[in-house]
Amino acid sequence: MWKELDILRKEYLGLGLSEVIDYEKFSMISIVYNSTKIEGCSLTENDTKLLLENDITAKGKPLTDHMMVKDHYSAFMFLKEISKQKQKISVDLIKKVAGLVMKNTGGIVNTMAGSFDTSAGDLRKAQVYVDRKYFPDFLKVENLLIKLVENVNQRIDTVSESEILKLSADIHYNLVNIHPFGDGNGRTSRLMMNYIQMYHNEPLIKIFTEDRAEYIEALNKTEELGDISIFRDFICSQQIKFYNAEIAKFKRKDKGFYLMF
């Protein structure tokens, strides 16, 4: 699988898509659509494109869904600019991204342990239980984040070209399983995964919404078996799917355009 990835990556890069007008923007919009759709957003990909390019809302769809999309895209653009500065990962950076993701849909949460604001990227102060799974105690979250940041920063400038995708998968898996925030953990984790890609000027990673079940299964199996290669392989398979789709799309243009009346 990883050899196939390397072959397709080289073919994809050889297409010179970075030189195509607004290709990166369209790619980011598609990633935002898939990422928010995974979280239950009702907007279609075309809805998402119209909203982000023309500020046109989708008739009859919740305002919250529109704000979710716009916040996600703003966080993406923020990371894109930060990546140009080669800024290392930090707990504050992750919190900043989480705050941007939840800027217009989050708010203050009151718990027995105190209050926290999801729209400001505050770390949670409550136990989280999702789909038969307990996430780490909130008192352990900050130290877990510090350890994750230390590990990523030790590798981020020394990782080989063939290992970058694995590092991206690693930050995603570990961050989403620390689950440091009251909401927006999946979106934030997918954004930080792509931050590694942008940091290294590598193609962005799209997790396809139609593969949501396989995505959740890969996360669960990785934890169950204690084997990070399971999630790495899933991310590899998604990138292969992305490369194949983009290469096929590019080749179709060679068929030419014919006027029809």
Image (cartoon, helix red, strand yellow):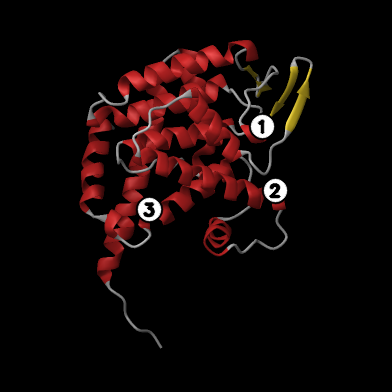
Residue at the spot of label 3:
24
State if disc 2 and disc 1 touch (CB < 8 Å): no
Q: Quadrant of residue 157?
A: top left
In terms of sequence position, does the residue under pointer 3 or pointer 2 come before the other? 3
The Cα atoms of the two marked residues, 3 and 2, are separated by: 26 Å
Residue 118's tag is 1
State if disc 2 and disc 3 touch (CB < 8 Å): no
The Cα atoms of the two marked residues, 1 and 2, are separated by: 15 Å
| In the image, farthest residue toward the front | 85
The residue type indicated by label 1 comes to: Thr
| Res. 169 visible in picture | yes
In terms of sequence position, does the residue under pointer 1 or pointer 3 come before the other? 3
The residue type indicated by label 2 comes to: Thr
Residue 38's tag is none
Frontmost residue, 65 versus 74: 74
Which quadrant would the C terminus be assigned to in this image? Answer: bottom left
Q: Position of residue 216 (x, y in %)?
A: 53, 30
Q: Where is residue 139 in the image (x, y as percent from the top left)?
A: 63, 11
The residue type indicated by label 3 comes to: Glu
Q: How dense is the environment of label 1, judged by Cα within 10 Å: few (below 14), some, or many (20 and up)?
A: many
Which quadrant would the N terminus be assigned to in this image? Answer: top left
Disc 1 vs disc 3: which is toward the camera? Answer: 1
| Res. 217 visible in picture | no
Q: Position of residue 230 (x, y in %)?
A: 40, 23
Q: Position of residue 242 (x, y in %)?
A: 37, 46
Frontmost residue, 53 versus 250: 53
Look at 58% across and 15% down and name the residue there. 141
In terms of sequence position, does the residue under pointer 1 or pointer 2 come before the other? 2
Residue at the spot of label 2:
64
Look at 25% across and 42% down and name the residue there. 9
Q: Quadrant of residue 108?
A: top right
